[in-house]
Image (tube, rainbow, N blue to C red):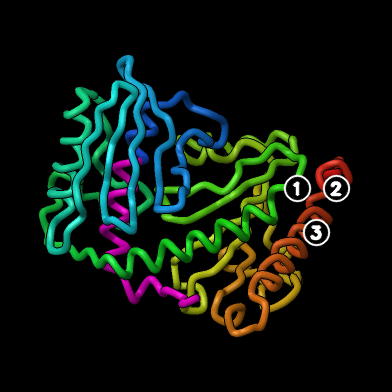
Amino acid sequence: MKIVNRSDWKDTYDTLHHLVQMMGKVKLASTPVQPEWANVPLEVYPHGFKTGLLYKNGVNFEILLDFYQSEVSIYDNRGNSKFFVLKDKTSVSGIYAEFMELLDFLRLEIPINTIPQEMNTKVRFEDNTKEITYDHESAKNAFEMILFAYHELNVFISPFRSKKVMPKFYWGTFDLGTTIFSGIPAPYETTDIIARIGFDEQMIEFGYAFDDTIDGFPYFYILIYPIKASEYEDAKPEGSGYFSKEKSEFFLPLKPVFESENPSEKIQKFLSSSFKIICHNEKWPNLDWHTQEIK
């Protein structure tokens, strides 16, 4: 499988990041709030991302992004549907206008905050008229990396008996993540509502990101909350993974993994060995129960 570096498809990446933010913001406005924002991420399906079943103004509906057809579509429980095609040389404001036409078609009045979140821009969707790029092949190749990462995370996380969030796509940070919880409350004292709801219990997040600022390649990461970085300075997970004191996370860059004979084995060993290191340091309770084999 080809490794897709974000730098190789940066313009298309930025286009998609804006689009999934639109989808995610509609989902946020159409679902009851859950702990750790579990209601917000997008779901992965064979052709792309989807919101899952949403409800607003008496209507059940769903929004889908298809990477293979380059389409964004909406369906409701009354038999109505509409779509638009993603084109090159358009703009965020142009995509937003077509996206809102989908909601208007179903007569769904769903106000959303049009300022991008967790991105390097604060220009509102409707005001961002700069010409942008959308390359179908780059988007499709990147999504196939998502499918690969989804499978690896799903294989790893499925046996755990802990409270968990199965692999989902987080539209704020444009990454794939799955999280398990120890059951110990750990409120994050902050005025930032995103962080306050997102971090309220001892947890470990395992994920995949396109952000190639780590060693120049996409990577798997492991985020611990709460974190005491100094306790992990000498941590050595199996394989080519490592703990970054600067980022306070474990990382596994994909380039050396894909140069090996069995990338999947390398990834699973990184995830499982890091989990053992973390649980030992954090003294997770009932660890035998969390990891008890399913029979």
Whether 150 is drawn above or below 265: the answer is above
The residues bearing labels 3 and 1 have C-alpha atoms spaced at a distance of 15 Å
What amino acid is at disc 3? Lys
Please state which of residues 144 and 194 is positioned toward the viewer in this rendering.
144
Residue 233: x and y in percent read 72, 69
- Amino acid type of the residue tagged 1 in the rendering: Pro
Q: Where are the magenta residues, as a range?
A: 1-23
Image coords of residue 72 (percent x, y): 27, 46
Q: Amino acid at mark 2?
A: Glu
For residue 262, what is the image quadrant? bottom right
Q: Which mark is residue 293?
A: 2
Q: Can you tell which mark lies on residue 159?
A: 1
**Quick check: marks 2 and 1 in contact, CB under 8 Å?**
yes
User: Which residue position holds label 3?
Assistant: 276
Vertical arrangement, residue 158 with respect to residue 281, above or below: above
Q: CA distance from mark 2 to mark 3?
A: 15 Å
Q: Is residue 277 left or right of residue 218?
A: right
Crowding near the residue tagged with mark 1, few <14, some 14–19, many ≥20 C-alpha atoms within 10 Å: few
Q: Earlier in the sequence, mark 2 or mark 3?
A: 3
